[in-house]
Image (tube, coloured by chain):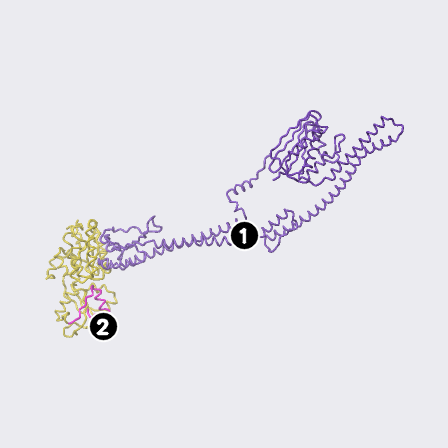
Amino acid sequence: MTEAHNPSDTKQRRRSIWIPRMFHTLRARLIVSVALVHVVLMGLFTWEAVERQSQELHQELINQGHSLASLMVVASTNSLLSEDLASLDEVTRRVSDQADVVYGEIVDVRGYVLASTRAGRVGQAVGSAIEHNDNFPLAAGDRVFDLREDVRIGDSRVGFVALGLGTENLERALAATKAKGIQYIIIALIIGSIAAWLLSLAVTRNLNELTLAAGRIGGGDLNVRVGVTSYDETSTLAKAFNLMAASLQRSSREIQLEHRKRTEAERLACVGEMAASIAHEIRNPLAALINAVKLLGHTKLEADDRDAVTDIVNTESQRLQRILNDFLTFARLPAPSMLKGDLIETIEQTIELIRHDPLYDERITINRLYDDRSHCLFDPDQIRQVMLNLMLNAVQSITDKGQLILRVTRYGQRLNISIVDNGCGIPEEAVSEVSKPFFTTRKGGTGLGLSVVQRILAQHGTALSITTREGSGTEVSFELRVAN
Amino acid sequence: MITMSARPHLYSFNGLANHSIKLKAWLLAWLFIAMSGASQADQSQSNHLRFGVLPLQSPTKLAGMFLPLTDYLARVLGRPIQFVTSTNFSRYMDRVTSRDYDLIYLNPLLYSRSREHGYRVIAKVASEPFTGILVVHRDGPIKELSADTLPNGLRIGLPDPDAYAATVMTRQYLEDLGIYIDEQMQVEYFGSQDSALLALHSGLVDITGTWRPSLRSMPEQIQKDLRIIAETPPQPQMPIAVRDDLPEDEIERLRQALIDLPKTQEGQAIIEGLGFKKGFTFATDAEYLEVSK
């Protein structure tokens, strides 16, 4: 038979493979979710702040550059026109004192440097055309923001100033902003996780109590109830749980009462049935005895007949005695005395008893299939009685030559004992009846043998299993607990 | 075409030793000379003509006046012209002496000196007589110029000892009247015509020597507050000269362009911006022989 697969179960299983087991709890999911939300929101906020500050810092540097370049233009115009190098040098020297200035130069209309903060540049030709001003972002590896501004008189251009501003301070400020942003993210993560953890505690505290209570109900304690201390969803669940527990407890009481009534009725019925069975079993031999005793009272009775009647009296009285002994054995079965021992020894002792039984014959072969590990806990006398009854039943089912297999097999912490015969088997309709007291298909049998076996096995915590096919044979088996 | 490599240095500072300047300027000059030698190859690639204008006004104002003219001349020549001036007359003449400029605009006296260094006049300012004027405050203490009535100890403001119209001609004019300014007055030089006029207007001096174009360039309110008390006899006008190693055809084109200025609307605007009445006219060295004497 194939198992039906639910697609959603398959998806769930596949997802579970990728998610570690510890994250399957509600608490872990809550913490992770809240922390994730904090990190994402804080990350977005930080990214936005860094981006904004980056733009502001860039704009500030651009404005600073343009202001400084404009000041250079104003300060150097007259000196540039009159080629007053000392004054131009004073201008560039003052410019170099400003923050972030990497270089400053004043170039005449021909493209010759008239003053520069950089050594060796004065007098060099740099070209009269103004290259394009830098824009942010700068090229990779470029750490200088370059600005050019014309020096104009009216519409005529008489030179230009070149200014380079270093971006190290700007980048340092941006890096500091980013570091601070990461700190905020980490703080948000910690605070969010703690808040989520506290929230999860509040949510799952009541769930834990419900889980424990459910476990105790599962263990049979139906008196357990959970406290309802809040007005949230878990308190609603707790109320429902308490109602369910009360309902279960009520149902359990009703079931117990019903069971007690039924047991009492069955017991009374069983007593009646037992009494009827005993009366039935005793009535025949007793009637034979009464008739025999009446016949013995007749004086005209021949000697041969008298002997025959005397045999009947003896036979029927012995039968009565046997019935009473079996019944007493069945009715007063003592509590087992569990000992640790080798089961095979007990089985071999039983086989020896069978060999001396008149029913046993050389026509029956006994095969032994024993496991070496055959020590277990059992009452030797009672289990010997069990083995004796089962083996006698097997032997008696074999009408001709036959085979008896005794198998002892260990399965984990259990020993399986099995007796297989190739006798006549049990009719299908009689299988359910064979264990009932006084049921027998054999002449002279009391019908208490299997009943005694069932009672002894029940006291050992096990039961008899019967597998049979009429005309082929029967296998009976039971299990015993291995001794540690 | 003459390349800039024909000259030993971009700038010459030979005359600096004769003047009181800062040590720093010297160091920079030497640095510049050293660097200019190293970058001579670069300089030789520059195609600019340098138009040196006598610092009669502040550099910016002078540039505002002459840049339209240099742009115009550059278009005519088909090569760029750089406008430059100097901090004072002395340094200007140092550069003239070292032939640092291709074109020069200066006064007749300084022109007569520049001839020794290879400069030749190609045009002069047209029409208006070249005179020096003496200007006083309209409400000032000087009402007339007379050796008898002029009190001693007056302060006179002049642009520069070498300013021809403003200083040389006015000084001669006063001497002809019997007024010796070095003995009877306190002489102060202000570096430019504008500065001298502004000093008069603000009361720093009692009388100023200058010339008409500078007075006309002053704001109207200042012109109203001042008045011309005397004007010298005329002399040859301010010349424009070229260095003698410029190609003849360029010299001729420059001359023609200057003379043709009033013929176009743009030229008239340039003349107006310069503060002249009619622009430029043809001039010869012979006109300035008298000045040099």
Res. B246 visible in picture: yes
CA separation, marks 2 and 1? 96 Å
Q: Colour of chain B?
A: yellow
Chain coloured purple in the rendered structure: A
Compare residues A255 and A164 and report the one nearer the observer. Answer: A255
Residue stretch rendered in magenta on the structure: B184-207
Say which element carries label 2.
loop
User: Was residue B193 drawn as part of the magenta stretch in this picture?
Assistant: yes
Compare residues B154 and B226 and report the one nearer the observer. Answer: B154
Q: Chain of mark 2?
A: B
Mark sitting on residue B139? 2
Query: Against A391, is B278 above or below?
Result: below
User: Was residue A176 drawn as part of the magenta stretch in this picture?
Assistant: no
Query: Against A149, is A289 above or below?
Result: above
**Three-letter code for the amino acid on which mark 2 is drawn:** Asp
| Quarter of the view holding residue A398 | top right
| Quarter of the view holding residue A163 | bottom left
**Three-letter code for the amino acid on which mark 1 is drawn:** Ser
Residue A325 vs residue B139: left or right? right
Point 60% across, 53% down: residue: A235
Mark sitting on residue A107? none
The residue to which callout 1 is attached is A200
